[in-house]
């Protein structure tokens, strides 16, 4: 894959104050990675170009700008593995598809095991991955130490490394490049991208959403597609629908620029820490989800402090690194830590995509293609079908969080 450092040409339309037209066949609410990818695939694969993407702030300025860029598909359950592996395959050809660099670097991802329970779960997941045709390996502690020499695999850390799963095809990409790439490609196909456009309310007629009232006027729509990470539940509530979703802060940080020291991604399920080194040299480190519910893009200091302390034990060389900046995104969390993708009942022409928790970025192209197909045909794509809202009534949950202690 290309890993060009060439900056993408920023399209002028991203900074233009575009006025929305009065009516669209499809209105996508949310101008992040998922919304932009959905609009692109609607136009590219289904010929639906009379599409508007509404963003309340600036393009990709929400969770898309606050993620830690990890891409992988080594999930346990068949349903999760299906959609994430579909996405990973699209990632592998995305630069050619969009004709712009996204700096997708397949440097591999390690998921560390620190206890006998971790080891058993990890080996089980490797077996399940291999049965699903996903590249996965089990490495013992010595093999992990050889792959990542700066990781302490002795018995000194509180969370001793007993081994790890390894997915060689996994890696990272540059989130803003991905957003701009989808935006440019969608715009070239005729999609309108409207920034600084706050959705205020909806108009309905029976089981049909007829229009959206925004800060920039009324917009009639043939189909409504919600894709606003962290806020889809708020928007759905304005339609009288209560989603089984809670929003939580999720913190991360980057260090000062450093010389290359880490050429893979390391995740620890027990510690809830993940770390990679970005293309420019900064360490990108993330913590687990804050336990409280909130929409503030900041988190509790004790959460990130405790988890970074554990990370420094695993990586002693990081103890002298200086923090450059910290931030938090807002993640939707469902009872089974898996997304909701599909129809938004009771409305015949409304769809929802939310609840990705910490897994949204890695799903960007795959979800965009699957969600676009679902919208275009008015029925669930086979990969989206298991993630319908109805599973919370039937009990057919996809509990990745319960399976792996964390669903990053």
Image (tube, grey):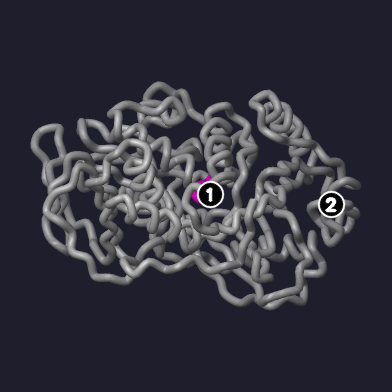
Image position, residue 13 (x, y; %) = 31, 66
Q: Is residue 170 left or right of residue 9?
A: right
Image position, residue 216 (x, y; %) = 16, 63
Residue at coordinates 44% horizontally, 40% vertically from top-left? 367
Residue at coordinates 66% horizontally, 28% vertically from top-left? 133
User: Which quadrant would residue 210 be assigned to in this image?
Assistant: top left
User: Which quadrant would residue 226 be assigned to in this image?
Assistant: top left
Q: Is residue 139 left or right of residue 246?
A: right
Residue at coordinates 52% horizontally, 57% vertically from top-left? 290
Q: Mark 1 — residue?
A: 96
Q: From which residue to which does the magenta span run? A: 358-362
Q: Is residue 100 left or right of residue 302?
A: left
Camera-side residue: 2 or 207? Answer: 2
For label 2, count other residues whose C-alpha is less than 10 Å away and answer few (under 14), some (14-19) or many (20+). some
Q: Mark 2 — residue?
A: 147
Q: In terms of secondary structure, where does tag 1 sit?
A: helix
Q: Main secondary structure of the magenta part?
A: loop
Q: In terms of secondary structure, where does tag 2 sit?
A: helix
Query: Which numbered disc flags the more N-terminal residue, 1 or 2?
Result: 1
Image position, residue 156 (x, y; %) = 88, 58
Image position, residue 143 (x, y; %) = 88, 46
Q: Is residue 306 above or below residue 236?
A: below
Q: Is residue 320 above or below residue 93?
A: below
For label 1, count other residues whose C-alpha is less than 10 Å away and answer few (under 14), some (14-19) or many (20+). few
């Amino acid at each position: 894959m290309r890993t060009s450092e060439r900056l993408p040409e920023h399209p002028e339309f991203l900074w233009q104050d575009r006025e929305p037209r009065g009516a669209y066949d499809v209105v996508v609410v949310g101008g992040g990675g998922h919304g932009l990818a959905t609009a692109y695939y609607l136009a590219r694969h289904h010929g639906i170009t009379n599409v508007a993407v509404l963003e309340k702030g600036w393009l990709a300025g929400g969770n898309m700008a606050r993620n830690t860029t990890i891409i992988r598909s080594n999930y346990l359950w068949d349903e999760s593995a299906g959609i994430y592996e579909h996405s990973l395959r699209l990632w592998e050809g995305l630069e050619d598809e969009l004709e712009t660099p996204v700096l997708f670097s397949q440097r591999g991802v390690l998921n560390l095991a620190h206890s006998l329970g971790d080891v058993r779960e990890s080996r089980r997941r490797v077996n399940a991955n291999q049965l699903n045709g996903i590249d996965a390996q089990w490495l013992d502690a010595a093999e992990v130490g050889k792959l990542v020499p700066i990781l302490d695999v002795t018995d000194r850390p509180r969370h001793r490394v007993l081994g790890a799963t390894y997915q060689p095809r996994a890696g990272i990409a540059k989130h803003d490049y991905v957003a701009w790439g989808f935006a440019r490609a969608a715009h070239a196909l005729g999609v309108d991208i409207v920034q600084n456009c706050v959705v205020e309310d909806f108009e309905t007629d029976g089981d049909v959403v007829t229009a959206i009232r925004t800060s920039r006027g009324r917009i009639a729509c043939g189909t409504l597609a919600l894709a606003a990470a962290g806020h889809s539940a708020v928007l759905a509530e304005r339609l009288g629908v209560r989603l089984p979703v809670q929003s939580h802060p999720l913190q991360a940080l980057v260090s000062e620029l450093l010389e290359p020291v880490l050429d893979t991604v390391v995740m620890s399920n027990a510690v809830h820490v993940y770390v990679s080194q970005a293309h420019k040299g900064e360490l990108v480190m993330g913590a687990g989800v804050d336990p409280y519910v909130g929409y503030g893009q900041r988190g509790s200091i004790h959460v990130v402090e405790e988890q970074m302390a554990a990370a420094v034990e695993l990586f002693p060389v990081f103890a002298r690194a200086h923090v450059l900046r910290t931030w938090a995104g807002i993640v939707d969390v469902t009872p089974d830590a898996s997304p909701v993708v599909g129809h938004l009942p009771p409305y015949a022409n409304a769809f929802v995509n939310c609840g990705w928790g910490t897994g949204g970025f890695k799903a960007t192209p795959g979800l965009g293609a699957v969600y676009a197909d679902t919208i275009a045909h008015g029925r669930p794509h086979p990969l989206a079908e298991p993630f319908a809202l109805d599973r919370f009534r039937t009990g057919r949950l996809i509990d990745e969080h319960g399976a792996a202690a964390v669903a990053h």
